[in-house]
Image (tube, coloured by chain):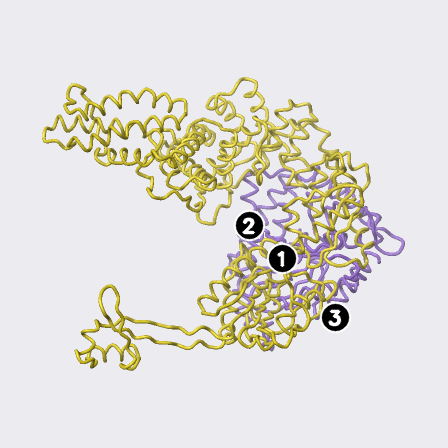
Chain colours: A yellow, B purple
């Protein structure tokens, strides 16, 4: 991005009279990284809309954030608002003027009401005829005046996941607001927000330049910040962190593991990044890799470093908010802290390893699973009971079932280890490691390690892990719904949407074809709900949540929303099979882009419309009189076995193509035959024939949900 | 810098910034926040500035004096500033300066940390403060206390004295800290850690503790509900019984005697009492005409 620095040439200054650069900086105490990202995003979006609404033309708008500031920069902000032109249509011209062109009372009344002289009324011809118009032009005011209200409103409008109050003031923000800088060109835009008045001062880096810095003009803003050891643009900070981290790790003989989440967090933790490598004792490398990485990344926010062979080196890279002064002290301090953390971790590891994981299952009785859902011991028992049920529903072999049941038994035991108490991020992962060291079968250990996936884009890689992950989530989902916890709006305290999303992601990833309703019902057994209505209600809620997630994921994958809705509305229990629904969605989506689709749609839509709901007649072949009728009957009979066979073996693309053969006969039928014949028996027979056509496609989709002429994917819900 | 120099340095610093130097509360508490100088004073509109050491009891964290970084009883240095001043962070940073920590030679971070104490019905937003990778302080803007939304927000600064001293003295083991010239933290406190751990994990009489919880709760309830002859509720004595409940709960928990359902129930009972104390305290201060507001038009 081009940066202007220093004094502007004279010509540019003159030009600044008609437009100028705007910088609006909300100075805060340290923002949570998520709030810094979110705040800048909202500020940019809201500013574009606000400038437009205020009729202030601008050049490029950019929003930035650092840990201590949210910044809006607008280039080429016009010095004045555009005029507002209001046009109001009045009476027809012939009512407004006499033949001689003299204004009538109607014209005068209209002009008066609109506040314009009658002589200013304009005549315009529009398709409806000739009318008079009142055109009012409100001249735009100076931008600086408008900004005094607009900028605080922008700040006020920002919303954060969690906001707070401070002092005795009523304002809420992500963290306390401490200063405001608002400069239009060389001038301060006088305004106030959160009890702070705008000025031309900003504050530099907390350690290096903690004092106010005067910004002479908006053009000089970034260069003043730079003198104050602040890099404004997160992209530049990210690049600096990446380069310096890579360099520091390289000098220590390795490559950094640039965990993307940690990197994004670091970008919003420092205003002037300086990366440096530190070391820890070789002996700690005896700890499991995951433990080392967790301690470094999650707890100390260091980047771990790998050697050429992919093994961890006894090296970390930390990023400091500041320059190189005292770097030796900072390194020494960080090394000292990491040594203590790793010594703790080694202590926990050795303590935990004194007993096998299996011996801890009993202690889970004292651990709350989720409020109102009992203990983790109860959860474990439910998972163990559910494992053979899932095996039956999905159709798993004995060995896999055995592994799954064992993995379920051990799955939560690591929650009472010291390691998880101290490093909660390791739940599951450390259980898998301990299980392997205890000599549990590999698939059992892998499954324990994968039970909390998906995390980000990481999905279970082992079969048993995928099944255990599904069990864990369906139990939580059904249990929470039993307790009356239903996610609403942004409220989802038990993470049920995430659980549902996880189930769907795994089912689709692994292509698990089974009836989810059956699994949900089996999971419900563990919660001992006796009321059958309540059971049905909870199962329906669970399936609804899962289908919503499936719908969102298919739409996100590019399938149009109405295609997804059509397959979700298919007949019988097919939509209870999520993977099958996804196959049907893809087949129908592909078919929609073939030429035949339009004819099939028309044929099936016409047929579906005419058959009354709940119609239940059978075709009597001997009553088929008309050749078109007979032809359709024959076509349906011919297509049926092939379509049904294709549906049974889930070759939905074949089924749809086979159904296309019916389009012609249906067309002809509607052209040549009057369905609503006077003879009741003939009519019923014809309806039965059409019902037979509709029935054939219903297991795949309800085509009436398809919005014809739309093939565009809608935004995910 | 010895452990006690650190403490004395903070006392002097905050005294010079207008804080009342309070004394540690003379009951077992889990954190400086439970001291009435924070819990009760943070309620209502009255301004307040105080600083004090608070020995903090976390029986479940005890490790018989054998773990180099774990203590069942440790020292917090607690500062409460109400209303939170505009320069709260700067004041804190300057306090580090007086401890000989020049920020230009170090790396100071304010890392997002939202705080919640469910037994107190308390919550706040703020940071864990890290110095060269070491967590040394909790910095919190209270939003709720005793389940009551606070009209005036206090800033709470809680220094982990042992952590800071270990950092300054570069001691891997807390018991090696030099408390005063010629004597270590371990020589003063290690045996006590061993005894408290023994009591909390092995010896504590669960039945007695349960009956104590019930008795303390009853007494707190009686004081909060009943009216004395003079017509006044003894709020602070009631609150002290809540603190006793809280400590007994912590002991039961360390002893492994609290099951799942019971935990939620005991915490809920404790929270209810804390809320009633808070409400009654507010009513009482209001009745008294918010004494600390007088002559301070700038406050609230």
Q: What SS does tag 3 mark? A: helix
Q: Could you tell me residue A211's position as x and y percent?
A: 71, 70
Give the mark, 2 or 1, whose residue is nearer the N terminus.
1
Q: Quadrant of residue A353?
A: top right
Q: Could you tell me residue A180's position as x and y percent?
A: 60, 69
Q: Is residue A82 above or below residue A483?
A: below
Q: Is residue A148 above or below residue A73?
A: below
Instruction: Please tell me which residue lies in front, A410 or B144.
Output: A410
- Of all residues, the one furthest to the front in this rendering is A100
Residue hosting label 3: B16
The quadrant in which the N terminus of chain B is found is: bottom right
Q: Is residue A529 left or right of residue A187?
A: left
Circle 1 chain:
B
Give the mark, 3 or 2, whose residue is nearer the N terminus.
3
Instruction: Please tell me which residue lies in front, B284 or A682.
Output: A682
Residue hosting label 1: B126
Q: Could you tell me residue A315's position as x and y percent?
A: 78, 43
Circle 2 chain:
B
Q: Is residue B223 visible?
A: no
Instruction: Please tell me which residue lies in front, A88 or A564.
Output: A88
Q: CA distance from mark 1 to mark 3?
A: 24 Å
- How many neighbours does mark 3 have within 10 angstroms: few (below 14), some (14-19), or many (20 or more)? few
Q: Is residue A607 left or right of residue B240?
A: left
Circle 3 chain:
B
Q: Specify the label residue A635 is tagged with.
A: none
Residue hosting label 2: B218
């Amino acid at each position: 991005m081009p940066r202007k620095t220093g004094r502007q040439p004279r010509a540019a200054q003159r030009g600044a009279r008609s437009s100028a650069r705007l910088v609006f900086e909300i100075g805060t105490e340290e923002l949570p990284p998520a709030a810094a990202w979110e705040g800048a995003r909202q500020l940019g979006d809201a500013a574009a809309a606000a400038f437009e609404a205020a009729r202030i033309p601008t050049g490029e708008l950019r929003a930035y954030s650092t840990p201590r500031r949210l910044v809006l920069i607008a280039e080429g902000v016009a010095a004045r608002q555009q005029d507002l032109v209001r046009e109001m249509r009045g009476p027809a011209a012939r009512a407004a003027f006499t033949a001689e062109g003299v204004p009538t009372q109607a014209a005068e009344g209209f002009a008066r009401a609109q506040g314009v002289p009658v002589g200013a009324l304009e005549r315009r011809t529009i398709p409806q005829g000739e009318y008079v118009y009142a055109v009012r032009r409100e001249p735009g005011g100076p931008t600086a005046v408008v900004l005094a209200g607009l900028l605080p409103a922008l700040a006020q409008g920002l919303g954060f996941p969690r906001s707070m109050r401070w002092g005795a003031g009523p304002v809420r923000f992500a963290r306390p607001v401490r200063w405001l800088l608002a400069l239009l060109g060389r001038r301060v835009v006088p305004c106030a927000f959160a009890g702070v008045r705008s000025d031309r001062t900003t504050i530099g880096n907390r350690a290096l330049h903690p004092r106010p810095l005067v910004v002479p003009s908006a053009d000089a803003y970034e260069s003043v910040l730079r003198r104050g050891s602040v890099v404004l643009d997160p992209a530049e900070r990210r690049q600096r962190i990446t380069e310096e981290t890579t360099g520091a790790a390289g000098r220590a003989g390795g490559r950094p593991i640039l965990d993307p989440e940690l990197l994004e967090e670091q970008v919003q933790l420092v205003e002037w990044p300086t990366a440096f490598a530190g070391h820890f004792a070789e002996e700690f490398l005896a700890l499991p890799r995951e433990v080392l990485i967790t301690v470094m990344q999650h707890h100390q926010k260091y980047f771990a470093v790998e050697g050429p062979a992919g093994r961890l080196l006894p090296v970390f890279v930390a990023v400091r908010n500041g320059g190189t002064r005292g770097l030796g002290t900072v390194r020494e301090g960080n090394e000292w802290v990491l040594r203590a953390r790793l010594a703790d971790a080694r202590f926990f590891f050795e303590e935990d390893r004194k007993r096998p994981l299996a011996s801890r299952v009993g202690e889970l009785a004292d651990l709350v699973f989720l409020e109102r859902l009992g203990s983790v011991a109860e959860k474990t028992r439910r998972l163990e009971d559910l494992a053979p049920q899932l095996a039956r529903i999905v159709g798993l072999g004995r060995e896999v079932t055995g592994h799954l049941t064992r993995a379920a038994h051990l799955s939560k035991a690591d929650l009472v280890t010291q390691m998880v108490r101290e490093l909660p991020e390791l739940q599951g992962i450390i259980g898998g490691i301990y299980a392997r060291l205890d000599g549990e079968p590999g698939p059992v250990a892998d499954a324990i390690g994968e039970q909390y996936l998906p995390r980000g884009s990481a999905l279970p890689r082992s079969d048993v892990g995928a099944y255990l992950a599904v069990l864990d989530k369906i139990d939580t989902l059904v249990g929470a719904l039993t307790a009356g916890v239903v996610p609403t709006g942004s409220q989802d305290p038990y993470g049920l949407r995430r659980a549902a999303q996880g189930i769907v992601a795994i089912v689709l990833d692994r292509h698990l074809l089974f009836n989810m309703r059956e699994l949900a019902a089996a999971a419900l057994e563990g919660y001992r709900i006796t009321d059958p209505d309540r059971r049905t209600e909870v199962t329906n809620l669970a399936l609804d949540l899962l289908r919503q997630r499936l719908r969102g994921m298919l739409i996100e994958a590019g399938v149009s929303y109405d295609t997804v809705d059509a397959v979700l509305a298919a007949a019988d229990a097919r939509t209870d099979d999520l993977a099958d629904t996804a196959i049907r969605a893809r087949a129908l989506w592909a078919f929609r882009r073939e030429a035949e689709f339009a004819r099939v749609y028309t044929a099936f839509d016409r047929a579906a419309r005419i058959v009354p709901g709940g119609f239940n007649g059978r075709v009597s072949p001997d009553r088929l009189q008309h050749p078109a009728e007979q032809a359709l009957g024959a076509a349906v009979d011919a297509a049926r076995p092939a379509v049904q066979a294709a549906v049974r073996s889930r070759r939905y693309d074949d089924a749809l193509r086979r159904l296309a053969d019916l389009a012609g006969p249906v067309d002809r039928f509607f052209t040549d035959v009057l369905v609503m014949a006077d003879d009741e028996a003939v009519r019923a027979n014809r309806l039965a024939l059409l019902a037979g056509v509709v029935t054939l496609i219903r297991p795949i989709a309800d085509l009436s949900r398809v919005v014809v002429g739309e093939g565009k994917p809608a935004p995910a819900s | 810098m010895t452990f006690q120099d650190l403490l004395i340095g903070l006392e002097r610093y905050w005294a010079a910034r207008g804080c009342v130097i309070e004394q540690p509360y003379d009951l077992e508490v889990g954190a400086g926040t439970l001291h009435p100088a924070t819990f009760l004073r943070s309620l209502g509109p009255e301004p307040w500035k105080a600083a004090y050491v608070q020995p903090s009891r976390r029986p479940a964290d005890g490790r018989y004096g054998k773990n180099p970084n774990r203590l069942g009883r440790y020292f917090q240095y607690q500062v409460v500033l109400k209303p939170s001043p505009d320069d709260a962070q700067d004041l804190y940073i300057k306090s580090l300066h007086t401890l000989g920590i020049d920020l230009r030679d170090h790396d100071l971070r304010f890392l997002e940390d939202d705080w919640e104490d469910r037994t107190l019905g308390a919550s706040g937003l703020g940071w864990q403060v890290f110095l060269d990778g070491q967590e040394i302080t909790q910095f919190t803007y209270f939003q709720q206390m005793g389940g009551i939304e606070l009209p005036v927000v206090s800033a709470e600064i809680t220094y982990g004295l042992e952590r800071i001293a270990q950092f300054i003295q570069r001691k891997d083991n807390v018991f090696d800290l030099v408390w005063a010239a010629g004597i270590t933290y371990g020589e003063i406190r290690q045996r006590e850690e061993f005894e408290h751990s023994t009591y909390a994990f092995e010896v504590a009489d669960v039945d007695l503790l349960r009956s104590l919880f019930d008795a303390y709760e009853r007494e707190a309830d009686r004081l909060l509900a009943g009216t004395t002859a003079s017509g006044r509720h003894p709020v602070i004595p009631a609150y002290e019984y809540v603190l006793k409940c809280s400590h007994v709960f912590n002991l039961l928990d360390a002893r492994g005697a609290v099951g799942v359902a019971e935990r939620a129930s005991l915490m809920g009972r404790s929270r209810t009492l804390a809320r009633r104390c808070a409400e009654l305290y507010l009513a009482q201060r209001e009745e008294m005409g918010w004494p600390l507001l007088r002559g301070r038009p700038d406050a609230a």
